[in-house]
Image: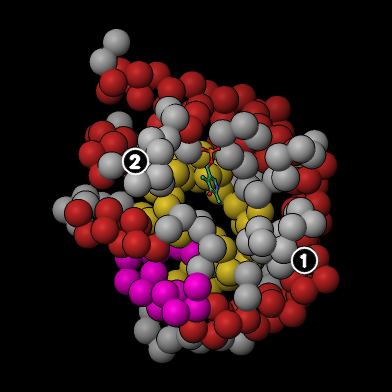
């Protein structure tokens, strides 16, 4: 098999996995957005995925994302920024990303304030005990949500989270769903949930995820960080 055939096979396998989980959850798979995470991979892989019909792509490092977006300007792509953001760089992300999934600090929210067209965003919840991980604690979620709502230039889509590696993903995503319910009490339209990666997207779908961020299950293993 050629690389492109392998890629198509993995993409098809994930698409049918998503359809199966959606059916099991009684949900419409067309209401689920699959973002292919291409971090560490060359721009060429994005081109190949675009040829296979993928439009939504995720990157977690600003420098790499900015370079790739510039290199692929000729394609109709939707870039999702999914990594930790520094407030110094936050503003620049607005120039290429359509969606930011990782708002987790007031300083980043403030840095993104703008009178320009609003950018879609998620507030990120930290499901681990590790403060170095991105995301806010449950207790801080409401306050950060309110800050996003009162900041011009940000349009809140909902809640994002990464399941802890050594936990039951279904239980972790149930916590995300509860957090989403809380956010919707103060922002009724912020009903989207960004959750689910290669190893746990089925569980995420069962708990209501609307935006899946899937890397290796589609791209194959990532090359070493460059
Ligand atoms: C890398 C990454 C993913 C994709 O992970 P895979 O296990 O390769 O599917 C999803 N979300 C975030 C925040 C990531 O950094």
Q: Indicate whether residue 81 is drawn in magenta.
A: no
* Label number found at residue 137: 1
Residue 76 visible in the snapshot: yes
Residue at 62% in and 42% down: 196
Left/right placement of residue 204 relative to residue 171 reads: left
Residue at 39% in and 69% down: 93
| Nearer-the-camera pick, 136 or 182 | 136
* Label number found at residue 41: 2
> Separation of disc 2 and disc 1 at Cα?
31 Å
From what the image shows, is residue 105 above or below residue 4?
below
Left/right placement of residue 18 relative to residue 5 reads: right
Residue 50 visible in the snapshot: no
**Residue at far left of view:** 74
The quadrant of the image that shows the N terminus is: top left
Q: Indicate whether residue 91 is drawn in magenta.
A: yes
Which segment did they paint magenta? 86-100
Quick one: label 1, few (<14), some, or many (20+) residues within 10 Å? some
Q: Is mark 1 within 8 Å of ligand 1?
A: no
* Label number found at residue 47: none
Q: Secondary structure at mark 2?
A: loop
Left/right placement of residue 54 relative to residue 153 reads: left
């Amino acid at each position: 098999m050629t690389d492109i055939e392998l890629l198509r096979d993995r993409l098809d396998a994930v698409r049918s996995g998503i359809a199966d989980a959606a059916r099991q959850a009684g949900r419409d798979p067309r209401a689920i957005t699959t973002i292919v995470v291409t971090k560490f991979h060359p721009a060429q892989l994005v081109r190949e995925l675009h040829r296979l019909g993928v439009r939504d792509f995720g990157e977690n490092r600003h420098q790499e994302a900015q370079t790739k977006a510039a290199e692929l300007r000729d394609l109709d792509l939707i870039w999702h920024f999914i990594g930790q953001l520094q407030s110094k760089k936050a503003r620049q992300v607005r120039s290429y990303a359509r969606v930011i999934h990782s708002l987790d600090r007031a300083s980043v929210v403030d840095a993104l304030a703008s009178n320009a067209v609003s950018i879609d965003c998620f507030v990120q919840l930290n499901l681990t005990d590790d403060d170095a991980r991105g995301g806010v604690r449950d207790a801080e979620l409401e306050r950060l949500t309110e800050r996003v709502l009162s900041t011009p230039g940000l349009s809140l889509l909902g809640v994002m989270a990464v399941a802890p590696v050594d936990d039951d993903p279904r239980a972790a995503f149930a916590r995300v769903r509860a957090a989403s319910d809380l956010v919707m009490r103060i922002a009724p339209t912020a009903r989207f949930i960004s959750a689910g990666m290669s190893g746990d997207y089925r569980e995420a779908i069962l708990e209501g995820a609307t935006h899946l961020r899937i890397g290796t299950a589609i791209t194959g293993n990532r090359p070493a960080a460059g």
